[in-house]
Amino acid sequence: MIQPARATARTQVAVIGAGPAGLLLAHLLAQDGIDTIVVETRTQEYVAARIRAGILESASVELLTAAGLGDGIAAHGDEHRGIYLQWPGERHHLDFVDLVGRSVWVYGQTQVQHDLVVASEAAGRAVIYGVTDTALHDLDTDRPSVTFTTADGASERIEADVVVGCDGSFGPSRSAMPASVRRTWERTYPYSWLGVLADVAPSTDELIYGWHPDGFALHSMRSADVSRLYLQVPNGTDVDAWSDDRIWDSLQTRLGEGIDGWSLAAGPITEKSVLPMRSFVQSPLRHDRLFLAGDAAHIVPPTGAKGLNLAIGDVALLAPALAAWLRSGDRSLADAYSDTALRRIWRCEHFSWWMTSMLHTSADPFDAQLQLSQLRWVTSSNAGAAGLAENYAGLPFGF
Ligand code: FAD
Ligand code: DHB
């Protein structure tokens, strides 16, 4: 059968995925005079509405601010000095500013995404939403390309100098790395999170991470009027099995037991979903003219809030590396990208696994004693607390 002719566009960097990694990469490259075209399977509205991460490390805030994307954070973000860690009967505050001199910011991924879309539209950058059949070609030549079908059914091709896969855990870029060079590491966890968004003022000034025999609970927030809360639930949990009353009762038990004088304010739940938890790394992050960034290359379980920050960290390394290559032919940073990024990625993989393992309960009473011992150490020893604080508030991007 004769295939219909494809319209071909030419750019320097073809970016697959318009999540935070893809849009931030396009933004930073534009500041270095590099052209991009971004393709995205979802609609702009769908991507903008996804409820995801809530915490930015200080290095992420510094990078976004330096890139001219800091106005929303300055106006609506909430700087936190630390977190609370607790178990029944004890709640302890860890002050990251005192411990390691760095803070974190509550600023939702939806807000980051919004800021990126506004900047992208203001600059008139090419972002093509609603595509299907995204495929990568000729990655081992100096003219790689991406083909796709537009929302109108037209077949299109983008030819580029390099292709960057920012297409998250389900996109095609990861598996476009040749099987002969790629290596993966993976861990699944025997529990999930039930996450809810509620129209109620947070019952805490800073996030509470709670260990409880019934399972982990987390009290986070999005604003002075909106709370974000999570409960550990078994894998395969049906969200309909959790009525609003059951959710509020469980949160009150897991976060309130033995904490004198504290109670959780309940309110209307506006969103409810179950998230599985997984650790995953694929290396290398670059082969020939294909690069990976963000969730396309690695996944962390959410405890410790590293996923979005890791995506920002990858892009912070990749943008100057591609700019040096495409502007002056200097490939040294591009050649170093995978190894440099992986050092930080594995540190965050370890931290996310460690926070997850310390806080999520299993049926094993021996494990429970180990977890409580670890929690007592982290909250009573300056060295233990500083280790957690340094990782949570975030290591430098080039770590
Ligand atoms: P994504 O945001 O997944 O973007 C990838 C994009 O690629 C998507 O828009 C997708 O539609 C698109 N795409 C996929 N396939 C194709 C294709 N074939 N063609 C074109 N486009 C394609 N991280 C934190 O740091 N802190 C947190 O508190 C936190 N909480 C989270 C809570 C939840 C509920 C979830 C789900 C995640 C959370 N994370 C958190 C993780 C964080 O959201 C991700 O790590 C982050 O979104 C990664 O950004 P990304 O741009 O790499 O990938
Ligand atoms: C949030 C998510 C996390 O995984 C976390 O560790 C802290 C906060 C959140 O969605 O607000």
Image (cartoon, rainbow, N blue to C red):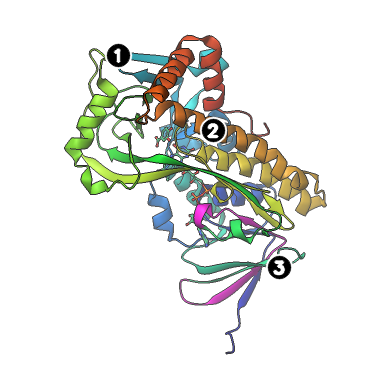
As drawn, which residue projects farthest toward the right? Answer: 329
First in residue order: circle 1 vs circle 3: 1
Q: Quadrant of ligand 2?
A: top left
Relative horizontal placement of residue 12, taking residue 213 as reference (left or right): right
Relative horizontal placement of residue 162, taking residue 303 as reference (left or right): right
* Quadrant in the picture for residue 198: top left
As drawn, which residue projects farthest toward the left? Answer: 245
**Residue of label 1:** 89
Disc 3 residue type (three-letter) = Asp
- Magenta residues (range): 151-170
Q: Nearer the viewer, residue 89 or 8?
A: 89
Placement of 46 over or under 142, stated as above or below: above
Q: Is the C-beta separation of discs 1 and 2 under 8 Å?
A: no
Inspect this view and state whether residue 68 appears: no
Disc 1 residue type (three-letter) = Gly
* Quadrant in the picture for residue 176: bottom right
Question: Could you say where residue 352 lies in the image, as x and y percent from the top left?
Answer: 51, 33
Q: CA distance from mark 2 to mark 3?
A: 36 Å
First in residue order: circle 1 vs circle 2: 2
Placement of 385 over or under 167, stated as above or below: above
Look at the image and tell me in which quarter the C terminus lies: top right
Question: Could you say where residue 210 lies in the image, as x and y percent from the top left?
Answer: 35, 24
- Per the rendering, the mark at residue 61 is 2
Inspect this view and state whether residue 237 appears: yes
Question: Could you say where residue 325 lies in the image, as x and y percent from the top left?
Answer: 78, 51
